[in-house]
């Protein structure tokens, strides 16, 4: 999916000098964006976790989520979503035996 939007060898986001961001620089930038938006204690992985969890909760198949996140294995994708107690309660209340 990413290859449709950017050159595979080029940076997804460019620094002010037109170069790749270092991992630390990108993490710092994302943290600053979250802080400015009022999200405290958030990180780049917080956004990925929210993305995966929202898709799963809305009924997306984990294989689709895996592809959207660019993962090669479902096990990696599974680390990014969590199930809330409310969701478990809803599933149990809808269970028909």
Image (cartoon, helix red, strand yellow):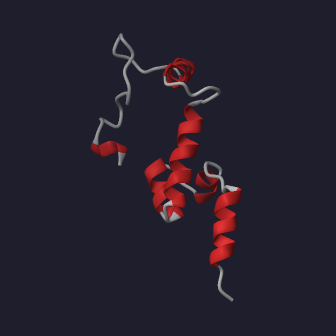
Q: Nearer the viewer, residue 57 or 73?
A: 57
Residue found 65% across the figure and 50% down from its top: 79
Residue 42: x and y in percent read: 60, 30
Q: Residue furthest top?
A: 17
Residue 69: x and y in percent read: 48, 48
- Is residue 58 shown above or below 39? below
Residue found 68% across the figure and 65% down from its top: 88
Q: Nearer the viewer, residue 95 or 53?
A: 95
Residue found 50% across the figure and 63% down from its top: 63
Residue 8: x and y in percent read: 34, 37
In the image: residue 86, left or right of residue 17: right
Instruction: Report which quarter residue 41 is drawn in.
Output: top right
Instruction: Report which quarter residue 96 is drawn in.
Output: bottom right
- Is residue 16 shown above or below 9? above
- Is residue 89 shown above or below 54? below
Residue found 67% across the figure and 74% down from its top: 93
């Amino acid at each position: 999916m990413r290859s449709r939007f950017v050159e595979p060898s080029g940076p997804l986001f460019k620094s002010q000098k037109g170069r790749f961001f270092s991992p630390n620089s990108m993490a710092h930038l994302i943290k600053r964006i979250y802080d400015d938006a009022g999200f405290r204690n958030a990180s780049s992985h917080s956004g990925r976790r929210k993305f995966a969890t929202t898709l799963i909760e809305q009924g997306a198949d984990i294989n689709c989520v895996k592809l959207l996140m660019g993962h090669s294995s479902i096990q990696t994708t599974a680390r990014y979503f969590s199930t809330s107690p409310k969701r478990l309660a809803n599933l149990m209340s809808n269970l028909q035996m």
